[in-house]
Image: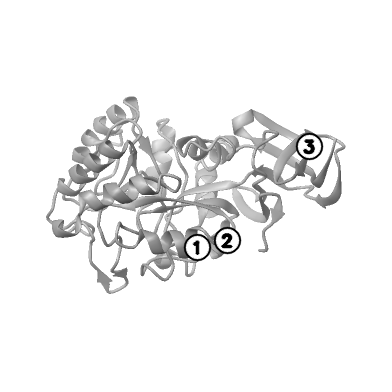
Amino acid sequence: MSGDLVLRGGRVIDPAAGLDTQADVAITDGRIAAIGPGLTGHRVEDVTGHIVVPGLIDLHTHIYRGGTSLALDPLAITRMSGATTLVDAGSAGASNFEGFRDHVIRPAPMRIFAFLNISYAGIFAWKPGLMFGESSDLRLLDMAECLRVVQENRDTIVGVKVRLGSYASGAMGLAPLDMALEVAEAAGVPVMAHIDYVPPTGREVLDRLRPGDVLTHACKGFPNSLLRGDGRILPAALAARARGVLFDIGHGTISFDQDTAARLADLGFVPDFISSDLHAMCVDGERFHLLTVMSKMLAIGVPLAEVIARATATPAAYLRQDDLGTLRPGAVADVTALALDGTALRLAGCWIGGKRFDL
């Protein structure tokens, strides 16, 4: 079998296909053509010594650069992490989604999806020294406009985002969540719920979430941790997972606690999605991009194949993108190559639609 491009000699790990083997990957016309030994191609790139995985998917980023204060350039995120699909977690609301779509999403070489913020203005004032929660004034939560924009952009918008807690929603309690859930129900899409500090409590939020909804910042520490004071998992979290609520890491700046993550993993409660919540306030110094978060999960003992699955196959299935998150023949040729040093993952290269992305 020959292809336009062959990635030769890597360790291919594709959890969606149950694959972990030394093999070549052939790419033709932007699609995976074959996986196996001894493949030939017009161009050959040697990836010996590297792990070759489906293009990574970061389910929680902020990339409406120029439109929101906390957002980053999506090109910079891919250069850091090798993520070939990015999901923006509510940077834009109904008032500015058109600009996000036309000026960031459509020109980008990587695939970009979005959760639309229930707030009409999106996350509009969020930087050091100025943090105005977009859910803290119910006058900004225009349900009709949110529903309209979701319905008009179903190719790109995958759900509704709501941010809750004393920072994000002030004294509004559960009202923003209830409004987001009503819009999501009408649109037939899930909700991604952020929670920072009380009020409301994590228990109250978890009790309202439906099958398919996502609670992000699942590994945050006290308060609003998924762990009780005695180290056991909150009954509300167990009940939510049992009825189909999903859990996302969303590392960010103060939304991840290593000890909490380790204890949850010990109890068999690893979040469904590994994501970065990369934004302008967690990019300087130690950069908490997707590979950083994946490395942290490896360090607490989550097996490599499970870590890769939670950043490839699992988010692809959630996004209903059958040709992403896998290296099966016929799938889109989004590929990430990684180097592994102990439990630390480092980017070695990535290809989007079979074309090498310039790191």
Q: Secondary structure at mark 1?
A: loop
Give coordinates of residue 51: x percent, y percent.
Answer: 69, 44
**Image position of 256 (left or right of 104):** left
Q: Amino acid at mark 2?
A: Met
Image point (19%, 45%), residue name: 179
How are the residues colored? one colour
Give coordinates of residue 96: x percent, y percent.
Answer: 34, 63
Question: Which residue lies under the disc numbered 3?
Answer: 23
Question: Which residue lies under the disc numbered 1?
Answer: 287
Question: Which residue lies under the disc numbered 2?
Answer: 80
Which numbered disc flags the more N-terminal residue, 2 or 1?
2
Do callouts 2 and 1 mark residues in contact (Cβ within 8 Å)? yes
Label 2 Cα crowd, 10 Å radius (few <14 / some 14-19 / many 20+): some
**Image position of 277 (left or right of 343):** left
Image point (51%, 62%), residue name: 74
Q: Which quarter of the rendering shows the C terminus? A: bottom right
Q: Amino acid at mark 3?
A: Ala
Gap in Å between the C-alphas at discs 3 and 1?
A: 32 Å
Picture quarter containing residue 356?
Answer: bottom right
